Amino acid sequence: MNDNLTTDTGAISLTAGDALTLDAVADSAAAATLTAGGQLVQSGDIIADGNVSLESTEGSVVTSAAATANGSNYTIDAGDSITIGGAVIADGTARIGGTREPSGSVAINATINAAGIWADAGGDITQTEALTSSSVVNLDAGNLLDVDADISATDITLNGDGDVEVATVLNATAGNVNVTAGNDVTLANTTDATGDVTVTAGNDVTLANTTDATGDVTVTAGNQLTATGAIGGGAGTDNITLTSNTGDIDIAATTAQTALSIDAGDNLIARSTLTW
């Protein structure tokens, strides 16, 4: 469909039993809803003064154009996989795989700006463009969670049943950062929270840059815990608790305002000053 669609008062609703492709601009005075049984492709902009909803019940959803939900919410669901290649702006929430979790991957290759961002996938989640939320960001991957662009939100929750790899800044502006992995956690850039920072891994944890919180920092590794960046010190971190169940704890400068607790399953290696 490549003719522009515009409504003055009502909603736009497009449904296909198999594939659906929107090449046109869809400008709705109310909601905009696209539903396909097979693959759904959005290559034309969507502007709606209501909810924007994209769903493929059995196939994939691929977007390469922008979607704007003025005053409302954005949802995208698929039975197979989701690829977001067009910027998303929602005055309400943005939910990816929330109603129908894709069995495969979710790729976030465009910016999302919303009042709350959630993404769920049975497989990998990869994020290559910034997520900005005036509320929470919550990403939950059935396998790898790979974050390669900044996340800014009041609260940040990242979960991967496999590895969680974060290359960029995590900034919880009014709450907590929680990172959990079934296997390894790697945080390569700064992690900062006005509340608490909690990192838990079934295997190894690597903190390659500063980890700071106004509240507490708690890091638990099933095996090895390595911090080459400072823990605490910048925001006046209250309590710091570091635990490795079976392996070493190898840490740089660590500063707690109240209490510092370190429990290593094997060796403890402190490469700089520990202060509490």
Image: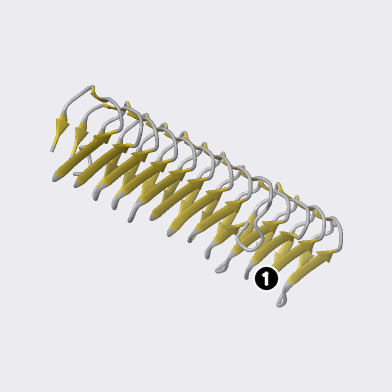
Read off the residue under disc 1.
Answer: 31
Q: Residue at x 58, y 42 (%)?
A: 143
Is residue 71 or residue 178 the one in the foreground? 178
Where is residue 127? Give x, y as percent. Answer: 56, 42
Does residue 267 sit above or below 34 in this rendering? above
* Number of numbered callouts drawn: 1
Where is residue 213? Give x, y as percent. Answer: 27, 45
- 140 with respect to 56 (left or right): left
Is residue 154 or residue 31 the one in the foreground? 154
- 70 with respect to 188 (left or right): right
Q: Residue at x 44, y 51 (%)?
A: 157
Where is residue 126? Give x, y as percent. Answer: 58, 41
Q: Give the SS element for disc 1.
A: loop
Instruction: Report the amino acid beneath label 1.
Output: Ala
Q: Residue at x 54, y 40 (%)?
A: 162
- 7 with respect to 254 (left or right): right
Q: Quadrant of the N terminus?
A: bottom right
Q: To which quarter of the image does residue 33 belong?
A: bottom right
Q: Kindly give the residue lying farthest to the bottom in the view shown.
A: 9
Where is residue 44? Give x, y as percent. Answer: 74, 53
Badge 1 crowding class, 10 Å Cα cut-off, few under 14, some 14 to 19, many 20 or more, is many
Does residue 192 sit above or below 57 in this rendering? above
Is residue 210 or residue 254 the one in the foreground? 254
Q: Quadrant of the C terminus?
A: top left
Does residue 175 sit above or below 272 in this rendering? below
Does residue 237 sit above or below 45 in this rendering? above
Tell me the colour scheme of the image.
Answer: secondary structure
Q: Residue at x 67, y 60 (%)?
A: 100
